[in-house]
Image (tube, rainbow, N blue to C red):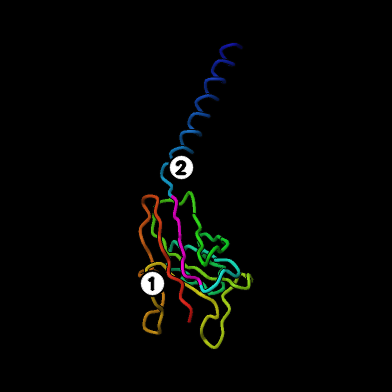
Amino acid sequence: MSKLIKYGTLFSSLWLAFVLFSSFKELQNSYSLTVNVENLRNSKGVVQYIIYDSEVNFPDQDLKSFYKKGKAEIVDNRSTFTFKNLPRGEYAVHILHDENKNGKTDIGFIKPKEGIGFSNYQSITLRNRPNFSKASFELNADKTVEVKVIYM
């Protein structure tokens, strides 16, 4: 009986060590992505931060099909948000200056009424529409990106 208890304790200890090591290894291979937005036209509302890990549904005007999403307050016409524990991979960032806090992109006559932005974009035109391949970047270390807000 004591051998059974001894082996059971040994097995439990090894299993616990395996689980802890696996979790630690997973955290070692994850990164933080900080997104900064400056020059917002005012400090009303919040900034919605959306990241995509594939071109499927990029960009999603309704903000419903994405990899991860977060929001942050605006202070002095600036906002910052950090996504944590992201695995190595290719990502693209989309931001929305959600002035009325309704959680969606408000559209006027064809154009957004609120500010939007995408990683690697300085302007948006009919000839320069956002696409994943241009907006994406490799995440293989902790990283900070600046996204320019564009009011149309």
Q: Secondary structure at mark 1?
A: loop
Proximity of marks 1 and 2: CB atoms separated by less than 8 Å: no
1 or 2: tag closer to the N-terminus: 2
Disc 1 designates what residue? 121
The local secondary structure at tag 2 comes to: helix
- Give the residue drawn at x 49%, y 73%: 116
Rendered residue at 48%/78% (across/down): 151
Q: Amino acid at mark 2?
A: Leu
Image location of residue 124, percent across then percent down: 41, 79
Q: Is residue 100 left or right of residue 33?
A: right
Magenta-colored stretch includes residue 6: no
**Image quarter of residue 147:** bottom left
Residue behind mark 2: 27
Q: Amino acid at mark 1?
A: Tyr
In this view, the residue in front, 27 or 70, is: 70
- For the record, the magenta segment spans 32-40
Residue 69 on image: x %, y % = 54, 61
| Magenta run includes residue 39 | yes
Quadrant location of the N terminus?
A: top right
